[in-house]
Image (cartoon, helix red, strand yellow):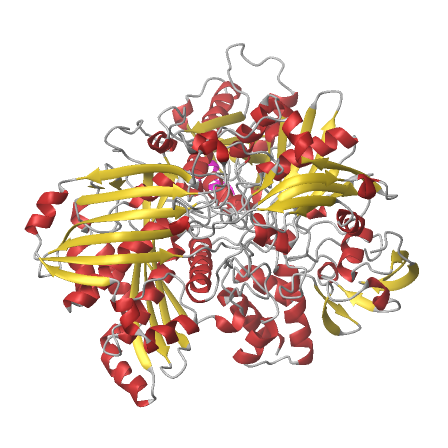
Amino acid sequence: MSGTTVIPERVETQKPQKGWAGQSVPRKEDKRLVQGEGVFVDDIKRHGMGYIFFVRSPYAHAHITSIDVSKAEAIKGVYGTLTGEEVAALTDPFFQLSTPPGAHLKDYALAVGKVRYVGEAVVAVVAETRELARDASELVEVEYEPLPPVTDARRAEDPEAPILHEDSGSNLMWEGVYEWGDLDAAFAEADRVVKIKELHFHRFNSTPLETNGALVEYNRGTGQWTIHTNNQFPGFAAIMMGPAIRCGLDKLRFVTQDIGGGFGNKITSHPQLVVCCLLARKLNRPVQWTEWRTDFHLSMSHGNERWFHDTEVAVKEDGTLLGFRTCALDDAGAWLRYEPLGGVIWAQVTPGMYRWRNIRLEFTQVATNKAPVSPNRGYSRMQHLWFTERVIDIVAHELGLDPVEVRKRNYVRAEDMPYETPNGCVYDSGDYAQMLDVALDLIGWSGAEERRRDAAVRGKLLGVGIGSTLDSGTNNFGQARMINPELQFSGNNEVATVKLDIFGEIVVTLGTTPQGQGHETTAAQIVADILQCSVDDVHVRAGHDSYWNSHAGFSGTYASQFAVTGLSAVKSATEMLAAEIKKLASAIFGGVPVEALELAEGSVRIKDNPEVALPFMACGAIINANNAGLPEDLDVTLNCRYVYRPPFQVPDIERKFGNLTLTYAAQVHAAVVEIDPETGYYEIVDYAAVDDCGKRINPQIVEGQVMGATAQALGAAMHEVFEYDEDGNLLTPNFYDYHVPHALDMPPLRTGNIESPSPFTPLGTKGMGEGGGAGIHAVCAAIQDALRGHGDAIVYDSCNPYHRVWDMLQHPERTRELVEVVQA
Amino acid sequence: MSAVSSSKTIAVTINDTVYEREVEARKLLIHFIRDDLDFTGSHIGCDTGNCGACSVIVDGVLVKSCMMLAVQADGATIETVEGLAEGGELTALQQSFSDHHALQCGYCTPGMLMSATALLRTNPNPTDDQIKKALQGNICRCTGYWNIFEAVKAATADMA
């Protein structure tokens, strides 16, 4: 870098003030990130490290008849290779969460004997440089015997369909029937039954800009691997990897710092991490793996594609919703890497935001010759909420009712909170109707008819659509037992350690793996309020390290929970530290009762005599380095660890009943679109996103999450698809073909919020960040509204690029066939 | 394919310091900057020239450094994100990005900053559309661009 002068860091202590929580404190992370001084996984280097490149399958389905790595290994600078055969000898298959038939899958870190999707990793090559590893991979000779693929989930259970996993006997992976209330009574009471033959939620994910990666070192002396990675759920990776590579979890040290976006897509990198571990041991050198963009698109964490068949909705003439039946068919892709958890996660939001009490859903998950699905922002709930929102709009459309009125008539009401859903989930707080009013106000709903006429004059079709969603947060992992009663999971936890170091430094250690959510900042806000100091005096360690002993089984950053699990752990650990500081001061001050002490201005002092004060620096120094003569029974370490455990019970597995998540943040989005009927081209001309996540610790960070989730939803609603051809080739394997939104694509956005504190969490917070699915629902609804009176097409797919809108304009009857209204 | 590639010794000036290195002829400029010279602030997000995370300024021109070979930069003067702040003092743009919460994970941020820096040098008072157009080559998956736009716009006014 330029010159050798080391410039001391400028420290500007922000003034202590009353209440850091609730303020948009500038992020502590920003200073390093705007200077390019973050440490992302590909930035980490080790002497003599080798670069990994994966040889991938060009076939969607094929037997592997032979593999020859000799030519690749003969190249100077190639350090070695790893094949499926070696993996099968050195490891056990990954533990399966499913009951049979999915339980029978034998999933290894590399393909063994057979490939099941285009892009499946077959061989790993390690070389001195990235370029050489890639070149050498071309010398690996793999012979395949192609098999017919199945790429359409609807054909997966056909008798003639090729079977992916002979061990499971069919392509069925998991199925379950969920039923609550009295369906017969609901349909008997109905005035109308709205039938919807088929709806389709498409395959996409959040495509974090940084792909997956790791740098792995093996310590031969201790048998321990150090895994520098951007995996966002090390707790899950550990329990998958340990048994597979036959080691205790103490042998797997996970380290993260800055992570370039995750969105759930970085949860299931455990197969690649196993490959890294095996190679680091085999080659006795550090190995580095950074996924290329095309590798990511081909193989990582596609979001769950889901079909909804034979839906029937029981509804009163006035739009009162009584209940529904549907069959959900979920396309898992080739392997169950986190699945079939999607088969229960949706049930966190079973009735959506509505009061219908009678619900039946038959869930079926099948395997296809496509990339394995894994969590993607809004995981499994987004699919289900899209379905419930589509149902609301189709019912309103077919019954000639106003979608706004149907929503307001059926929303769970503020006075019903906390509200127990038909399946035992408890919506903690909120006022959905008020949120809708705010959203409508922000898009100028009152002038909508005038705008519709104005657009018509310009030859455009204007439509307004609403998307309502819940962002259920803080999982009760006991819900996994509804998938498999044998699973020994339940509850949740997160850890924080807060200590006062020798010079009075306040050091906070988290178990989380943030990817841009600003944990260093919000944690510091909570600590500063309790210790009565400045956020600038609070040092929050960046990232996660198993060596810090500040993690537990569910540690990580996923599923909308930090504001509850992480910050509650921080709060309690800091309160423990505050109590210890007072206890120490009480001893130093000669027995002054702790009740007479207070923390203020970076010290502990006597309330009635503030001159008598002990600075934190002195506290830290006494305990850590100058402790002779302290009372023997003074139990103070100034190093406080707290594990937050949310109040959960194990759900009733028989009835599939229980509280599956602790908090329910809510979003109501409203979109105004203008369609050119000549081409199907459309623009979002106005957009509003209203959020309620309870108490906001840092409103600017919350709004940032709302914006980002909205942008991802708009991309998914309009363009983003992992599209496969009939042979199982991915047609969108890079950012040329997979079109994510750019700066010019963004519509004008207005954001709003209301604040309904959660009665169930220590800080009144709710986890948030995943609510953006609302944007998909809102765009679908707006398109359908615009087409009202212009063929009355039914929007049946969650992705609506211009050509599909054009199709709906040209052939509305093809979509009309999907819907029927029966007089009950 | 050929495992043995020809190499060439090149000299580039990065953030005011001259570096002379032997590089493989086929090495991309971004890999040279990141792997050989350890300027890891510039990132890689796509390999196809779409995402702009690797944007740097070469001889005054904004360049996606994954779209250029290192040997093509022989003799060039290159500015990367590490060279923006002087004496530990953030530039107005860097500060504005933080003030407006224009970054979350921070992975696209160096490229965004280089694009915006290049814009404001040539056009200190861009229109709204010019700002968006200047950022069109940079993908961000966290923010939805709204706050990035606001950050650049605010820096414009500051500089005027």
Q: Does residue A625 appear to the left or right of A583 in the view shown?
A: right
Query: At 57% from the left edge and 62% from the top edge, which residue is drawn?
Result: B97
Magenta span includes B110: no
x and y percentages locating residue A35 in the rendered image: 68, 57
User: Outermost residue, bottom direction?
Assistant: A457
Depth check: give the residue in front, A487 or A632.
A487
Q: Is residue A575 visible?
A: no
Is residue A532 rendered magenta in the image? yes
Question: How many marks on residues?
Answer: 0
Q: Residue furthest top?
A: A632
For this view, does A257 lie left or right of residue A798? right
Residues A34 and A121: in front is A121
Q: Residue furthest right?
A: B9
Residue A190 position, x and y percent, is: 9, 53
Main SS, magenta region, reads helix
A799 versus A22 height, above or below? below
Q: Position of residue A293 (x, y in %)?
A: 63, 55
Looking at the picture, tell me which residue is in the foreground, A120 or A746: A120
In the picture, the quarter occupied by the C terminus of chain A is: bottom left
Quarter holding the N terminus of chain A is: bottom right
Residue depicted at 50% across the width and 37% down the height: A165
Does residue A132 appear to the left or right of A658 in the view shown?
right
| Relative height, residue A359 to residue A786 (above, below) | above
Residues shaded magenta: A528-533
